[in-house]
Image (cartoon, grey):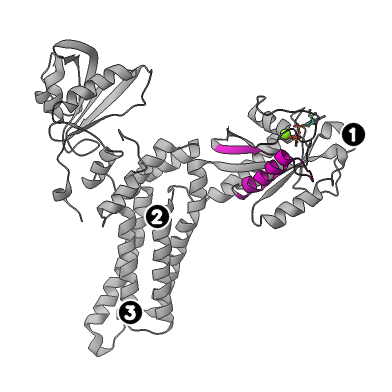
């Protein structure tokens, strides 16, 4: 479904800035009646209806002839606006009262409140953005890290759109040739060199799989990297946690079993958002609360992208080896970093027989913390390297998986020497799925699920 017939002609409005005390607030209005509705309440030296697009007017917002606030009114004319419709953005003073009065005035005049994401949805329907760009808008709004926001901005600028277009063009070339072949099927000719076709399909499958695989990295850029700090009691987990946070967040004491619940905080390292969880020390105990904490620790590790095992080096560098082995075997595939803490208490040199990957550190003196930060950034970039201009989300990853399956099935058909029409079926289905990613073919359900992630006013 596509085209102007689907365009909603209601005029909508919403607060585009966060509610609450602030210097400014912006109320956004979009739709055929946007300018006319604002005119009713605006008093300035210029008439809004005669104001050209890309113009700001200054004046008063009136309610029952009394002045509500001095405002700036930015006018955008269809189709040169965010939504592609007539848009007015009213800048007023912050605080919840003024903007609410402005919204109420509009609501009493045939303008309705926008649904979540409705402005961006209209931008999509009016072809100002494709679906991957609309999704990038949500990612920019929700970005928890600088790198995530930058990647989403590249996607908004059309990074993903271009990649999809290239894949699609590659496949359209193939289908064009296959169809030509079908036209001449009586004559049993092969226009497409099968070896070349196979190479092309392999390249496309590889590209699609690379994009699909970047979803995990994208999730890290979108919502942060989770690290569980674990170890035996008294190893210095909470001290390390506080040192990384640069404040005393967790209770530290010389009594083993101090931390019972887990504590989660977020820090930024080199522009990446890192969620650290300080956990209860793992040991044999009969204390019910402590046991509960240890059970929680396991579930925290399960949800983490990496585990830092803190060892109290003053008990020996090998003191936590059993725990490290246990974590490695129970949580296969999760990277484990071993920290040799309290090196300020160990006068002997760092034992050279220990694995090089272990980091000597002291939560007290700060030694080794920089190495730990660098190691964390290394782990993040190794997982996010594939996502340089796209933040593949769940919806897109599912579609990419289906595309890769269609293309692989085409490749299998090719290897079996199957006729062109069978190959064409799989390739056409891959083309259609690519269209689903960019939103060339869409239905309201897809849009509902994409835009439900948005907030009102976007
Ligand atoms: N000298 C020295 N002492 C440390 C260091 N890190 C932690 N400590 C001390 O070790 C003791 C335990 O520290 P915590 O941070 O509470 O240890 P924990 O691993 O969180 O302990 P639990 O929560 O009980 O499992 C405290 O007395 C800290 O001051 C360090 O790098 N050097
Ligand atoms: Mg603790």
Q: Is residue 354 left or right of residue 175?
A: right
- For ligand 1, give the image quadrant: top right
Q: Disc 2 designates what residue?
A: 396
Label 3 vs 1, first from the N-terminus: 1
Placement of the N terminus among the 4 image quadrants:
bottom left
* Secondary element at tag 1: loop
Q: What are the residue bounds of the magenta stretch?
A: 273-302
Give how far apart the Cα atoms at labels 2 and 1 are.
54 Å
Looking at the rendered image, the disc whose residue lies closer to the viewer, 2 or 1, is: 2
- Residue 439 seen from this side: yes
Q: Taking 401 as reference, is 414 above or below it?
A: below
Q: The residue tagged with tag 3: helix, strand or loop?
A: helix
The answer to whether mark 3 is within 8 Å of ligand 1 is no
Query: Residue 439 placed where, x, y %?
Result: 29, 53
Question: Disc 2 on helix, strand or loop?
Answer: helix
**Dot label at residue 422:** 3
* Residue 138 placement (x, y as % from top left): 37, 41
State yes or no: discs 2 and 1 in contact (Cβ < 8 Å): no
Q: Who's the residue at 53% across and 48% down the image?
A: 384
User: Crowdedness of circle 2 by 10 Å Cα count: few (<14), some, many (20+)?
Assistant: many
Q: Nearer the viewer, mark 2 or mark 3?
A: 2
Mark 3, Cα crowd under 10 Å, few <14 / some 14-19 / many 20+, is some
The x and y percentages for residue 326 are 74, 54
Q: Earlier in the sequence, mark 2 or mark 3?
A: 2
User: Which residue is label 1 attached to?
Assistant: 347
The answer to which quarter of the image holds residue 52 is top left
Q: Residue at x 77, y 32 (%)?
A: 362
For residue 142, above or below residue 391: above
Instruction: Between residue 279 and residue 57, name the one nearer to us.
Output: 279
State yes or no: residue 184 in magenta: no
């Amino acid at each position: 479904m596509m085209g102007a017939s689907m365009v909603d002609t209601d005029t909508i409005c919403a607060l585009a800035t966060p509610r609450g005390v602030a210097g400014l607030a912006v109320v956004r209005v979009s739709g055929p009646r946007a300018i006319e509705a604002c005119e009713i309440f605006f008093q300035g030296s210029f008439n809004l209806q005669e104001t050209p697009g890309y113009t700001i007017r200054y004046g008063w917002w009136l309610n029952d002839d009394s002045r509500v606030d001095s405002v700036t009114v930015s006018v955008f004319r269809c189709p040169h606006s965010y939504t592609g419709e007539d848009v007015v953005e009213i800048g007023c003073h912050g605080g919840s009262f003024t903007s609410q009065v402005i919204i109420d005035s509009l609501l009493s005049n045939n303008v309705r409140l926008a649904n979540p994401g409705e402005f961006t949805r209209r931008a999509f329907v009016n072809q100002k953005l494709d679906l991957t760009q609309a999704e990038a808008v949500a990612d920019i709004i929700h970005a928890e890290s600088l790198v995530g926001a930058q990647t989403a901005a590249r996607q908004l600028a059309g990074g993903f759109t271009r990649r999809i277009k290239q894949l699609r063009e590659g496949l359209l070339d193939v289908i064009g040739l296959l169809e030509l072949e079908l036209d001449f099927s009586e004559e049993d000719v092969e226009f497409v060199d099968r070896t070349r076709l196979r190479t092309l399909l392999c390249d496309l499958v590889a590209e699609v799989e690379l994009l699909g695989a970047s979803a995990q990295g994208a999730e890290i850029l979108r919502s942060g990297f989770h690290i569980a700090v674990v170890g035996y009691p008294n190893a210095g987990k909470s001290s390390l946690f506080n040192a990384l946070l640069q404040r005393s967040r967790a209770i530290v004491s010389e009594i083993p079993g101090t931390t019972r619940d887990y504590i989660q905080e977020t820090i930024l390292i080199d522009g990446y958002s890192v969620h650290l969880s300080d956990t209860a020390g793992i040991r044999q105990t009969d204390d019910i609360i402590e046991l509960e904490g240890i059970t929680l620790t396991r579930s925290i590790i399960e949800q983490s992208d990496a585990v830092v095992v803190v060892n109290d080096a003053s008990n020996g560098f090998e003191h936590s080896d059993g725990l490290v082995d246990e974590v490695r075997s129970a949580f296969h595939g999760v990277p484990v970093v071993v920290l040799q803490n309290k090196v300020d208490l160990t006068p002997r040199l760092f034992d050279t027989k220990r694995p090089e990957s272990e980091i000597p550190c002291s939560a007290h003196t700060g030694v080794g913390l920089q190495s730990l930060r660098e190691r964390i950034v290394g782990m993040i970039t190794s997982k996010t390297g594939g996502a340089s201009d796209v933040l593949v989300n769940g919806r897109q990853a599912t579609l990419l998986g289906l595309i890769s399956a269609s293309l692989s099935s085409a490749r299998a058909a090719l290897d079996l020497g199957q006729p062109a029409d069978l190959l064409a079926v799989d390739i056409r289905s891959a083309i259609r799925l690519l269209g689903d990613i960019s939103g060339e073919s869409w239905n309201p359900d897809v849009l509902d699920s994409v835009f439900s992630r948005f907030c009102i006013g976007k």
